[in-house]
Amino acid sequence: MFFAPEIELMPATESFAAAHIKPGLLVSTNYAEMLVKEIPAEKFAHMPHPKMNHPAFCLGHLSIYPDKMFELLGMEDRVEEKPGFEELFSPAAECVEQDGRYPEKDVIVEYFLDRHRALAEALPEISDETLQQPNPMEGRMRELFPTIGAALIFTTTGHIMMHLGQISAWRRAMGMGSAM
């Protein structure tokens, strides 16, 4: 695909995370960058419909998850939380029309890209044994994703694409064409 990064086949000695999770994460990250590239900064936190999440919220929300994965993987030294992002973009936060609370587009996009690329670079260091460990998260997240690997795969692929679909729909509602 034209938005896919150049990915070489992984040697048989590489971990599952490096061989199978990293390519999907890089494709998702590159697709996100394509989706938001042409969106004017002044429209980035605009809601064309009262129930439609805007790109600032979607990308801001996604940007907090690599650090959650670093914590889950025992790689706390890789965490680089952005002050205020958890409160603005957590699953419990409500998306609202820009009223001054959201950071500028460039801040959100750069943080999203930095955190996801940092996670992609760390994946080769994650052992298959770590991925097979029980998921220590509580409640529904443990029920849906019983292992660390299952949680990591969802967070680095399905979760990202769910919210990028929202950005794609937002683009159409704003009269923008396809990003591809």
Image: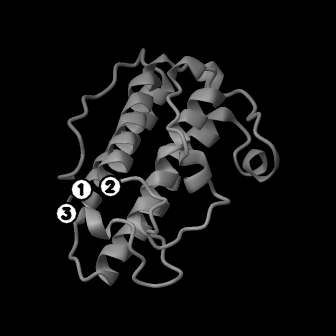
- Comparing 23 with 104, the one in front is 104
Q: Is residue 160 left or right of residue 175?
A: right
The label shown at residue 45 is none
The label shown at residue 38 is 3
**In which quadrant will I find the C terminus?**
bottom left
Residue carrying label 2: 105
Q: Label 3: few (<14), some or many (≥20) within 10 Å?
A: few
Image quadrant where residue 171 sits? bottom left
Residue positioned 76% across, 44% down in the render: 142
Mark 1, mark 2: which one is toward the viewer? 2
Q: Amino acid at mark 2?
A: Lys
Q: Are marks 1 and 2 in contact (CB under 8 Å)?
A: no
Q: Label 2: few (<14), some or many (≥20) within 10 Å?
A: many
Q: Is residue 176 above or below residue 111?
A: below
Tell me the element at label 2.
Answer: helix
Q: Marks 3/1: CA distance? A: 8 Å
Residue positioned 78% across, 53% down in the render: 140
Residue carrying label 1: 34
Q: Position of residue 95 (x, y in %)?
A: 54, 68
Q: Amino acid at mark 1?
A: Met
Q: Is residue 72 visible?
A: yes
Q: Marks 3/2: CA distance? A: 11 Å
Tell me the element at label 1.
Answer: helix
